[in-house]
Each structure stands twice: as structure tokens, then as C-alpha cells.
Amino acid sequence: MYRTHTCGELNISNVGQEVTLCGWLQRSRDLGGMTFIDLRDRYGITQLAFNMETNAPLCEQARKLGREYVLQVKGTVIERSSKNTKIPTGEIEINVKDLNILNAAKTPPFTIEDVSDGGDDLRMKYRYLDIRRNPVRRNLELRHRMAMLVRNYLSDRDFLEIETPMLIKSTPEGARDFVVPSRMNPGEFYALPQSPQQYKQLLMVAGMDRYFQIVRCFRDEDLRADRQPEFTQIDCEMSFVEQEDVLQMFEGLAKHLFKEVKGLEFGQFPRITWHDAMRLYGSDKPDIRFGMQFVEINDVAKGKGFGLFDNAELVVGICAEGCAEYTRKQLDALTDFVKRPQVGAGGMVYIKYNSDGSFKSSVDKFYTQDDQKAIADKFGAKPGDLMLILCGPAMKTRVQLCALRLEMGNQLGLRNPEVFAPLWVVDFPLLEWDEETQRYYAMHHPFTAPKPEDEPLLDDPNRWGDIRANAYDIVMNGVEVGGGSIRIHDRTLQNKMFHTLGFTDEQAAAQFGFLMDAFTYGAPPHAGLAFGFDRLCSLFGGADSIRDFIAFPKNNSGRDVMSQSPSPISDAQLEELCIKVDVKSDN
Amino acid sequence: MYRTHTCGELNISNVGQEVTLCGWLQRSRDLGGMTFIDLRDRYGITQLAFNMETNAPLCEQARKLGREYVLQVKGTVIERSSKNTKIPTGEIEINVKDLNILNAAKTPPFTIEDVSDGGDDLRMKYRYLDIRRNPVRRNLELRHRMAMLVRNYLSDRDFLEIETPMLIKSTPEGARDFVVPSRMNPGEFYALPQSPQQYKQLLMVAGMDRYFQIVRCFRDEDLRADRQPEFTQIDCEMSFVEQEDVLQMFEGLAKHLFKEVKGLEFGQFPRITWHDAMRLYGSDKPDIRFGMQFVEINDVAKGKGFGLFDNAELVVGICAEGCAEYTRKQLDALTDFVKRPQVGAGGMVYIKYNSDGSFKSSVDKFYTQDDQKAIADKFGAKPGDLMLILCGPAMKTRVQLCALRLEMGNQLGLRNPEVFAPLWVVDFPLLEWDEETQRYYAMHHPFTAPKPEDEPLLDDPNRWGDIRANAYDIVMNGVEVGGGSIRIHDRTLQNKMFHTLGFTDEQAAAQFGFLMDAFTYGAPPHAGLAFGFDRLCSLFGGADSIRDFIAFPKNNSGRDVMSQSPSPISDAQLEELCIKVDVKSDN
């Protein structure tokens, strides 16, 4: 037993006790007659007192200790003369009698404080020091707690956590697989799972009824900011359910998390169709913490001689309440914002509804005061409001306006990370056209069922884009935290779907044959959903980035800068695996 | 809502209710006027009744349904005339009014019964059907339950489950790594973790204090029976602990599992040193469900002119109580058993202590009745007992005798899978000599601490084999279910250890540099343990094989015969990864 207590548990009721504590030296203060050390562990901080008068050698020794030294101390709990009410241990300190240096420490390359002076690269290289910082530690504690809550919630509802394989078959459909050469099967490869999709469907065929797994998944994608090559899903599947059953079940899970972690209670989550989400927010993951819904104004904006609007497929805008006083500079900045390549708009039209009832706009020469009043009425604008309008091809313009809406939300402080606005987005399109390869892809995945009423459209290639899927996403604060679908459980329909996606029978059989075979032996109707667990944690933790909710993340090149991986392997390893490295010189 | 109830929950109290059930057709019985169908889901079986008199068309339809059809039925719960007391739903049946075929099913390739006619290969190919069988389903349910018990137990004791990376750095030490080519870092590879060893130690340096993870691990070994290339560990690590703390904590966990799963209560688990385990059982994982400890008889066996014994380093045997009546045939079979190449003994000597007090042995011409009495006394044998004796080089002979002891345990019914005998094996050797490479290897791993009193022996290469480690295994019924050690937290000692293992400073730095660096920034004393979770589940499930406790296992060639993985990947994939397949024709 190295210690009798942690550094977080002693308080006034322990005064007089002899205790042994272990921890790291957070800081020390030399006040001449006394030296104080803050001893830190995962559980808290306890103040150690060394008295020059009563034990000079020990006090001298204590003064020489550096930051992050690992210490074991024995002493008596005493009441502090000057109390710290901010921490649970703030009323006491330890009158130290024995001091044992368990390990020395070099001076850390950045301070182990809530706000550190370490940059991102340094923090990642010394992640084991970064995790000592309260904010990172708390994130990992939150993640543990959320995983426990999820597991117990689902287990209490008859879900079984079933581990599916990590070494699986590579399937070209979808994102790029990470592959693993098989030494025992030369020339052959496993893939790491992008998700346990096929296995969880097989478990439904196997009669397991309710499955879940908090599971690592892998995608070899070019990493955008805040994407990780390995990530964690809460993966779920249920049999004999309809969409409503799935939505209720996982809305229940989300509410449970909100209540337990955040103390928040919610009524039924709102729902919006994908079509409406695109029309009203320009996004399939709208942030509904604030309104500012899109208003389409073709009818009142066109035919007044303003060519840009007249020639546009869609004229659409948002109304920013109380922003009519925006300065020229602010408006120019917004125009610059929408013209950035990441947004890509050609420009922005504004109309100020002044508090005196008059209008001032960037298109005054095309639109009379009455014309602008008609537009303002369309927006439901009041004096003091500001309308911001974009135009162009419908879908493209909506996406641009979405960026502007979120920017306005930020500027107006409408996106508080401690406010939560969950939302179901339903009725996603089944298929998505890809310009580059000139074919349709499954928007969700090839096992997603079309809405029964839209099934006949599969026979008409011209209508493929109109087919709606029984697919749904759960969105919070503009972030997609989960998604799923009703699966196809009928082999005939599944074959039709493969044909729609351009698979030959042979290709479908080679890739998904075992799943298709399984479907002939009595597949139940089934459906599922997966949450992105890293993202869910970061959302609950009030942070934008998922990186600090992952103990050892990788950087944007997929590298772990701490262990310097990936790295070359030996020729002997390559030879055993029957592969050769073949790096082109222009790589 | 496809159903109002599962097939396992209706009983006499539900009589009169209108219900909707879904499930698979387990069997149907056509009794002329009535047809009965057993409808099965994960939760149980409910009998469906179709009446030819009251609804002939429906009854006719029911008669045509094949095994494993997926059905939805509506009807009324009625009391059965002939009750089945063996199942919870046995007092009722459903008077069916509506029948809806949710999916047809081909006849399964083997019967979905507790004892199936499917061979191993067929069961693995159609694993999704195999899992429908009660024994396999129950195994997966047990596994889920055990994982939940473990997580809640550890979480309640301040352990945090922290996910460590799956894409890590390859380290040649230990077993062979599976590797993953990095597309973004051409010519470089990740490895899949053999265990999260280094990361969990880093988490201790990071101050996380108590860590656990139920985690997938990977080893590219030639697969012996019942080894899987991917397997699951309950991986644990603690800071500021001594060996006793670790043993108490995880003994507590094991007791919790025994109590919750098996209803068994245990006192303190016995402990044995590695040295004694080898001496008394010839194994570092003794099955102590039965005694039959080894007795070394050099002093009474040598010097009687029996050359084999006289020239042997060790003469050692076991006493099988009450087996003096073994026939010639039985004894020959035992001799054949020890002479099998898997055991490798040259022969076996037996001495029968007949019930009349006389002796009969295979070496009567060398040993008088008095000599044999002296041997019998050494064994503590009584009239009616049988002594079985081997001889040869000490360690080799012990291992051979271990096999014989276990075989006798089997023959005498002393190895009941429902009896549990846990045991700690402690004080493992730190280092293990490898004849082939003529060097020492770490028996546990290179981070295991020597016992402090044995540390000085590190300076004397001649004594390296004598150094004991602070390492321990938890053994149940002759199976190693877990093991761990106190870690080295001092960088100087760790460097010395690396040198002992033949690493140059450069090699150590290249492989473990980041861990060694971490140790300079304040590493706490720490220790850990990992349970083999697949094995633990199979033990609690009373089975020898781990395969049926893994939803989708691989065969002995590392293949998943269901999905036919591993498999070749496309040239495009290879090119992107900058690797070439290089299979020699003699492979």
C-alpha cells in the first residue's frame, strides 16, 4: 500500500489522522519559515506543509523538489489557517513527517495547467503529460462515464454487446479500407472494418434481436481537420422494428445521456425531412439552436431588372433580427465571408429594414422602397432587421447560405455550446449522383431500404434521384452525431439495389455473397443506427474538436507524433508477409 | 411495432390477451385437426395453434411453412390443454388469427437444435445459423453479461475505461505483429497491438491512476488449436500499488464474477510460487481441482540397479488413489499415452499397492517388496493405490508427468467443468533462455520488474536464470486466465533490462524511446494485469474451446470461412498503398 488516501478525499473530518499520500508536485511555495507543496493526483490536490522550525532538514529537502516529481508523503491532517473554499480539500493540509521521492522528473516542456503554454504539436508529442492537465483528464473521464451510461442503458433494454471481427474482408464499395497482409495466406489481405455493418446484419439473421457494440472503426481517407483514421462508434441493430421504434429507442438513449451528464430534460426531439432541412437550412444537419430559417423570394425578387436575381434558379435569404445597424465594414466582411473559396458565393445582397421603417439595400437602384417592403414581408422582417440574400443554382446557393447563417449565428452568440438542440433528420434520398464517375451511389449504404411507397421508382432510372430512403440522422447543434436506416431484408430487393448501384451479379456475389446467402435462410426485418462516439463526447464536453476526447489521437497525416508511427518495418517482416514496398520516386 | 411481446414472456397470467409475436419456425406438428408451430426468438419459444375446424385456410397455410421461416402472428393467448412444464411459456399457446410470412427460408444445412447435426466446418460457414442454436446464443449472452459485470465492477472502483489506438508502432520484440501499410506515409506501416502494454503504462505516467479496457489484441502466430489471430483482453493497470494490492483487486473481480455468474463464493485464492508449481505439478498453470501432487523419489528409487532410474536426473511420480485394480490394458494405454510424441516420455513405471498390502510393479526385478514399500511410503500411498513414475531430465520429465497427471484426472472424473479451483502463481522467472537464438528473453515482457531482492543478480549473467520477477498469473482449472506484473518505473533499471535482453541503446530507443522518455517526466510505481477474456468466458461457460464464445471466429489458418477472408485485393488498392505482392512460387 503506497497510500492511505488519494489527493482528492481528505477534508476537515479527517483532521488528526495519520495519512500517506502519493502524487505529483503541482507547485511549491517557499514562504521562508514554511514551504507548501500542492500534491496532485487524478482525484484532486492536497496541500503539504513543511515547517522550517520543526523540521529544517525535511523542509530543505522539500524546497529542492522540481515540478512533476512523484512523491510519497506521510503526515498528519491539520486544519489550514487560510482556507481555500474552491477545492474539496481546501480546509486542510498535511503536516508532513516523511518524504519519499518515488521518481524524479525533468521539467516538462509545457506547464501542466488548465490553460497550458504548450502548442498543439508539443502537447501531442508529450501526450502523457498533456493528459495530466485537468481539461484533458476530464474529457477522458467524461468519455468513460458516457460509455458506461450507454452500455448500461442498452443492456437494461435487452441489447447484447457482441464483438465482431476486426480482421474482415475488404469491400471496395464505400470509403477506402485499411488492409492487413495475411502471412498465412500469402497474397491475401484482411481489411479493418469501416463499420461492423454486415456483421451486425448477420447477427440479426442469427436471431440476436438487439445488438450493440462500442467499437473501433477505420477509414483510410485523406484526413480533413478533425477526422481520425480510427474512430469509435456506438453501433446498434434491432430486429422486428419499424423506423418509429428505432427513433424512440435511441432518442431515449440520447435523453438518458443528457439527463445524467448534463442534467437536461427534453420533450420529443423535433423531426425534419431531409428535403425540408435542405430547403430551410441548406444542410442535412441543421443547427436549430437558433431560427433564421431560409426564405425563398423568387416571386418578389425577380422581374425587377436585377439580372443576377432574374437569371438565378433560386433567390434565398435569411433575416438577422436586430442587425439593421450593421456597418458598411461589417457588411463587407460578410460579403468577403461568402466569397471565400470555402463558401464560394459570387456575392451577397443585403436589405436593411431601418428602425424608421425605411429600407436601405445594396440593390436600391433595382428595388423601390415598396419592392423592398414586399421582400421584407416575405421574410417576416420587422424594423431593425437585416436581410442577407444569395442567389444561384438552388442546391449550391442553399449550401452557401447555410455557411452564412452559421456565421451570423456565431456573430450573434446564438450557438452556445452549453445549449443543446437535438433533431432527427428523416427521409434521406436513397441514392446520390456522382458527377465524376457518372453513376449513383448509396447515400447511406447499399443495404438501406427505400421507403415502400418509393420502391416502384427503382424501375425508372430517371426517377432514381427521387427515391427516399427509410434513413435517419440524429443531429445536435449542427453536428451529425448518429445515423441509420431500415435495412433491406428481402434478397430480391437487395439484388435490385445492387443492380441500381451498377454491380454485376458476380461483383455483388464476390463482395456481399455471404450476406446475400444469409438472407435466404430467414432474415427478419431489421434496422439500426450508429452514433459517432468521439463526436458525441466532444459535443457533451462542449468542445469543437474530437482530438481531446481521444487519449492518443493521430494528426492530419495519420501520424502518432508521440510514438513516431507509422514507421518502416524490417525486410524480414516484409518477406514473411510476401509483400514488397514499391514507393515511386515522385511520391 | 412488429410485435407486442417476445416469444419468451407470455404465461398463464396473459390468458385472454390479444398479442402479436414474431420469430422463426422451430418445428411444426400436424395432428390432423390441429397444427402446432413452435415459434422461436432469442427469448424463448411460444406454441402457436391453428385449428382446422375454425379456420381451415389459415391452418392449411400454416402447414406449408418450412423450418426457419420468419413469421408474424396475431392471436389470443389461451391455456394449453397439455402443458409443458419445462419452458416458461409452457402453460399457454396462441390461438392464431392472422399469419404473416415476413420472410421465407431455405432449409438450413444443419438442424437448429441444441445438439446439431452440423459439423464444425458447416457450422462456421453458416455461423449466422449456428448462432440461432441455444448453446451458442447462451455463450454470447454469457459473454455480454460478463463484460458488463467486469466493467461495472471496475468502474465502481474508480477504474476508467480508456481506448488506446489500434494503429500503433511495430515492435519486433515479442510475437509477430500484424501490420497495416500506410497510404499517406508510403513505405511505412502501422502495427495492430498485441496488447496495449505501452499505452497503459503511458496512461499511468499520465496520472490516470486506474485504467482498464476490454480490448481487441492481435498476434500473427501460427495458430495452434484454439488460438485466434484476434482475441480480447480485459486489460488493467494501477498506479501506486504493490503486488498485494493488484492480487487483492483482481481476486475481488474474479470472486465477483464467480458469485454473480455461478453463485459460487470463495475464500482467499491459494497462491503458489512458479518454482513450486513446476515441482509439484510440472506446470505453471496447475489444475488444482484435484491433488495428485508430484513426489520426487530419487532417494528411494536410485541405487537398486535399475539403470533408467539410476541415470536419470529426476525420478518423479504421482499416486492415483484406488487405482491398484487397473488392468494390464489400462496400464499399457497409459504407457502409450506418455510415449505419444505430444508427451514424449520414453516409458512409464507403475507400482500397484495391492489391497492385500503386497506390491506389483513393472520393475519387480529391480525392487523388492520392501523397496517398493519405501517408495509407497514416500508417496504416502495406501493399499489400493497406483503409483505412476517417470524419469529423465528434471524439467522435461515434470512436463511429461503433468500430462499424465491431467490424463489421470480426466479418467478419474476429477476435472468437473462445474467445479472451479482458482490459484495465483507468483514469482515467475524474469528471464527465459532460448536455445535457438542463444539469448535470454523476457518471460512476461521487457517492462516487468525483478523482485527488488533479486535485482543485484542482473549484474551477473550467470545468475540471470535465477532472477525472480514480480510477476503473477491467475490460473483456474489448469488454464491461465490472466497474468501481470509490477512494472519497472525507473529508467536506469529499464535500461539495464534492455541491455540484459540484448538491445543496444539505439534499438531500445528506436522501439521504446517514447516510453523511456515518458519515464523521465515522473513515472509513478505501477503494475497491471490482463485477463484473456475469450478464455475466461469459455471457462465460465464450462467449455474447452474459446471458439464458441466468439461470434465470428477464424479457423486454424486464420480464415473466416463464412466471408472467405482474407482475400486478394485489387491492383489499384496495392498501388495506392505502394506495395507489391511477392509470393514465391514455392509458397
Image (cartoon, coloured by chain):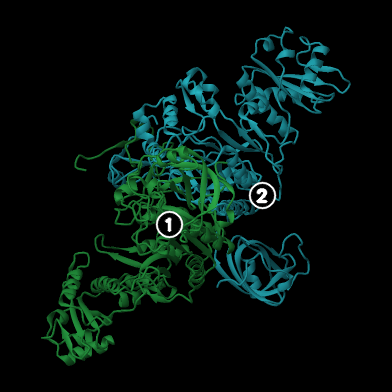
Chain colours: A green, B cyan
**In the picture shown, does residue B167 fall above or below B401?**
below
In the picture, measured across the screen, residue A82 lies left or right of residue B184, that is right
Task: From the top left corner, tell me how far across and down residue A259 is, in percent.
Answer: 50, 69
Give the label, 2 or 1, closer to the camera.
1
Whether tag 2 and tag 1 are in contact, CB under 8 A, the answer is: no
**Residue at the spot x=40%, y=56% of the render?**
A135
One can see residue B233 in this view: no
In this rendering, the count of numbered labels is 2
* Quadrant in the rendering for residue A408: bottom left
**In the picture shown, does residue B55 fall above or below B501?**
below
**In the picture shown, does residue B510 fall above or below A210?**
above
Report the residue that reaches farthest toward the right.
B356
> Of residues B128 and B374, which is closer to you in this image?
B374
Which corner quadrant holds the C terminus of chain A? Answer: top left
Task: From the top left corner, tell me how far across and down residue A133 is, in percent.
Answer: 40, 52
**Residue at the spot x=77%, y=19% of the render?**
B378
As drawn, the label of residue A167 is none
**Mark 2 neighbour density, 10 Å: few (under 14) some (14–19) many (20 or more):** few
Separation of residues labelled 2 and 1 (CA atoms): 49 Å
As drawn, the label of residue A139 is 1
Where disc 2 sits, the SS reads: loop
In the picture, measured across the screen, residue B408 lies left or right of residue B553, that is right
Report the residue that reaches farthest toward the front.
A53
Task: From the top left corner, tell me how far across and down residue A561 is, in percent.
Answer: 32, 44
Disc 2 marks a residue whose amino acid type is Val
Q: Chain of mark 1?
A: A
Residue position for label 2: B115
Disc 1 marks a residue whose amino acid type is Asn
Where disc 1 sits, the SS reads: helix
Q: Chain of mark 2?
A: B
